[in-house]
Image: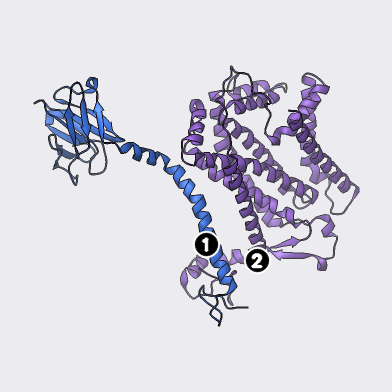
Amino acid sequence: MPDATALNNSSPSGVPHRRDLLQIGMGAMAVCYAGALGYPVYRYLATPAARSRLEGEISSVAIPQKNLPDAGTATMFLFGSRPAMLIHHEDGTWVAFDAVCTHLGCTVGFEPQKHRIFCPCHGGTYDMNTGAVVAGPPPRGLTAFHVEVTDGHVIVSGA
Amino acid sequence: MATSSFPERDAQGRVCTARGGVCRWSDERLGLSELIALARHKRVPQHKHSFWYYWGGISLLFFIIQMFTGILLLVYYRPGKEAFESVRQITYDVDFGWLIRSAHSWSANLMVFAVFVHLFSVFFMKAYRKPREFGWWSGLMLLGLVMLFGFSGYLLPMDQLSYFATKVGLQIPSMIPGLSGLVNDLVRGGPQVGEATVQRFFALHAVILPLLFIPLLGFHLYLVQRHGNAVPPGEAVRPESERRSIPFFPNFLAQDLAMWLIALNVVTILATLYPWDLGKMADPLSPAPVGIHPEWYFMSQFQLLKVVGAWIPGFEGEAAGMTLFGAVTVFLAIIPLFDPDSAFGKRARLTSWLGALILGGMIVLTVWGYAAL
């Protein structure tokens, strides 16, 4: 019986043993099977994630007049699949931010009395005009969107 | 990767020859060597009927595929009001959803087929005899659960076919005096098949039946392990020296796995080339689809009721049909007690004839049922 303790163990002539070839072939086939079974299962399970990635690939959102916030308040909307916030300041200016806290992903809220955007989860505090971090653990500020006020509605587009 | 096909044992009988290493480390803690020694000790008889030994294993593979694809379907399936819509999404919207659903349906049908082949091969090899009676009985109970799996799973898409199939299927036990109220209150959840029915059929299909099936299957497999493969009477009369056998591990296991690979290929080819259809959403107000008929594994019972019903009209016909069907079930259940001997006695021959009659009857009724559609 040939000594077949290692894969690359070849016969004296340098030709691999038949058993080694068979085992390489079997291994390759097993990998093919695992791939052929695993790929559809992965795609099946990942469908909602793939769909929301597609939804996320938008460049702007139009917010109709009836949904616009009064001065001194904010309204929440979805920019693709991500929560976002449109603030109408007392002075009549408009700003919009990605409303996902950069710390651990909670949705932040506008607190007009305290003049801040606040995340209740771990106390992250952001500037209500620029989205920059004021206090707390967030590593960076909220992404600001470009806001365009047109006749009757507001268009928010990616920065 | 180890290239030796079977681990050699050292002087202590251990399978791990390398000093130290992961193999030795786990072996000392888990006793793998003992398991392998046990498996190596086990032998599988070899004779002209050995082919039938594979069918229990094939049934097991289909069950594993059912669990795997069933769990995947659970990810998107919503019972109750949205049942049809969620199956529509699985079939048409979710990537490869059609394939998973199709594999689940095909594998279900193939599993029923494999279980029937297993049942009749065990029957004709007389493998229900002492000491394997409990193996036979647990197998019959598993068959009953498989049929319930099929019946309850069939409703879940809530399309026209599944709706009417369930309606008719539940009408039959309702005709047994005293059972009507029970079926209404507990099984159907009301006078009509609807949201309440699909919700409880889902609980039955995905929770209750697996909870019953898996331990019973474990018991069944334990008995197979304990008693080994039965040798058919024709083989058992030969002298010990003329009988051949092969080790279970790795020889028979390798053959078993080869059969699994073939069965897996059959499921994937059928599921890919003949994806399972989804009909129109169930609508109680539209007439039942023309040519509606049960799945093939309920066809012989369906045709039996139809034939007996034409012969004896009304409730008596249904009752006669069901009695005949019940008699077959009782016959199968008591067979180990009726035919307990290991030789070719009178009873053994009678049993084989009756078994052939049942199998022949089922095939004829099934073919007849399809021809009469």
Q: Position of residue B177 (x, y in %)?
A: 72, 21
Residue at the far left: name it.
A91
Q: Residues within 10 Å of mark 1 (few under 14, many from 20)?
A: few
Please say if the residues under marks 1 and 2 sit with CB atoms less than 8 Å apart.
Answer: no
Q: Quadrant of residue B213?
A: top right
Chain on which label 2 sits: B
Observer-nearest residue: A14 or B175? Answer: A14
- Chain in blue, by letter, is A
SS at mark 1?
helix
SS at mark 2?
helix
- Type of amino acid at the residue the image marks with label 2: Arg
- Camera-near label (1 vs 2) is 1
- In the image, what residue occupies the spot 52% across and 39% down? B98
Chain on which label 1 sits: A
- Chain in purple, by letter, is B
Residue located beneath label 2 in the image? B40
- Type of amino acid at the residue the image marks with label 1: Ala
